[in-house]
Amino acid sequence: MLSLPVAGVAQEAQQQLQPVERIAAIVDEDVILQSELDLAVRNILAQYAGRENQLPPRPVLERQVLERLVLNKLQVARARQQGVRVSEQELNQTVAAIAQQNGLTLDGLRQRLAADGLSFEEFRRSLAEEITIQRLRQNFISRINVSEAEVDAALEREASNSRQYRLAHILVALPDGATPEQIATGQRKIEGILNVINKGEMDFAAAAVRYSDSPNALEGGDLGWRSLDEIPTAFAQQIVNLQPGQILGPIRGPSGFQLLRLSEVRDSSEAPAQTVTEYHVRHILVRVNDRQDEATARAKIDTLRARIAGGADFQEVAREASEDNNTRGQGGDLGWFPADAYGPEFGSQVTALEDGQVSQPFRTDAGWHIIERLAQRETDVTDENRRARVRDTIGRRKLEEEYERYLQELRGEAYVVFRAGDRAEPVAN
């Protein structure tokens, strides 16, 4: 008869008795471990140190945090389906940059994380997920279009109203194609939340932390400072008529029912005139490539520089010998541009010259150059920058609205099961 060694049997039995880590939630084909949830809750508690009374009871807090983790899992999974990957090199560079920003070595960062109860591996995993989600969000940018007419209209509104508004919101989410029963339930819930706030039983921020379905619920629903163009047009005008502390809503929006609170108002003073120094420059380029090595290119540019120093016309030499096909026909004329337009090496040469001077040969990634600085001017870019700022503001608002709808769809389509002890409890989407 064959028999196992006693030590082997004991070891096998001990392994079988070791507890299996609990699962906090099942998210499609992935899981959220209880340890992940505990760590995320600890991070929130650390952020609210000394202000714990602003947080909801522990079970409610855990549910809010778990919902955020669910959304993160869904976003990471969708990003990977779309081919988004974070390389080890990129992750290492990001970790090193974070350590440097905090004045730490990598070992120092490890020690700081350990003191906060977070392993270095968990930190790297979390960071990789964060980068992945950022990439997924960036994929939506190509869908966003801002017309010149929208910019013009926004500038008109800005001229008549230079104020900014600090807002907070509470969202009771509704799925796409919500049934009348789901809509009625959502409306009762948002009205109940408003009633609790109006009675003074809970302030707006605490109610947001406890009840809101928005990803920023744990920040008290704070949306930060917004100009009118960053506020959805459906209720922007109503916000203008509010006084600080007043609440707008309930409002039915694309994502569900909302309450909006105006926290503060401030004037955004008109920005002073903005100018940029531009330079008018000619250049001659000799490339370094497979057909012309470094030494040959350097000898050629030195010869051209000597010809110019001897009285040859810069334009004629450029037309004859420059290897920049885009400017050769114009005698090397690059037109007007700010100093940093062609990179730091080129820019430092331009700014070091006086008008009418010709540089010594210098190297960039493109090859060897000589430049002649013709003139310098100050250009007013106030209007250009203002339009760029407004275009960016409108684009960010549209992106935020589009991405919030996307998250609602993602959550509504997902199979999510929250675990309570050993009993699995399906959660309605």
Image: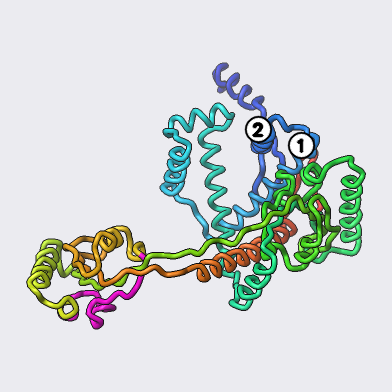
Quarter of the rendering containing residue 115: top right
Q: Indicate which disc residue 408 carries.
A: none
Q: Is residue 342 visible?
A: yes
Left or right: 179, with 93 as reference point = right
Q: Which quadrant does the C terminus fall into?
A: bottom right
Q: Residue at x 66, y 35 (%)?
A: 47
Left or right: 146, with 287 as reference point = right
Amino acid at dot 2: Ala
Q: Which residue is mark 2?
A: 46
310 vs 210, nearest the viewer: 310
Amino acid at dot 1: Leu
Q: Residue at x 56, y 43 (%)?
A: 126
Expressed as whole percent of the image width and height from the top left, the position of residue 83 reads 52, 60
Q: Which residue is mark 1?
A: 55
Magenta segment: 319-338
Quarter of the rendering containing residue 31: top right
Q: Residue at x 61, y 25 (%)?
A: 15
Expressed as whole percent of the image width and height from the top left, the position of residue 306 reads 8, 68
Expressed as whole percent of the image width and height from the top left, the position of residue 23 reads 70, 38
Expressed as whole percent of the image width and height from the top left, the position of residue 135 reads 54, 57
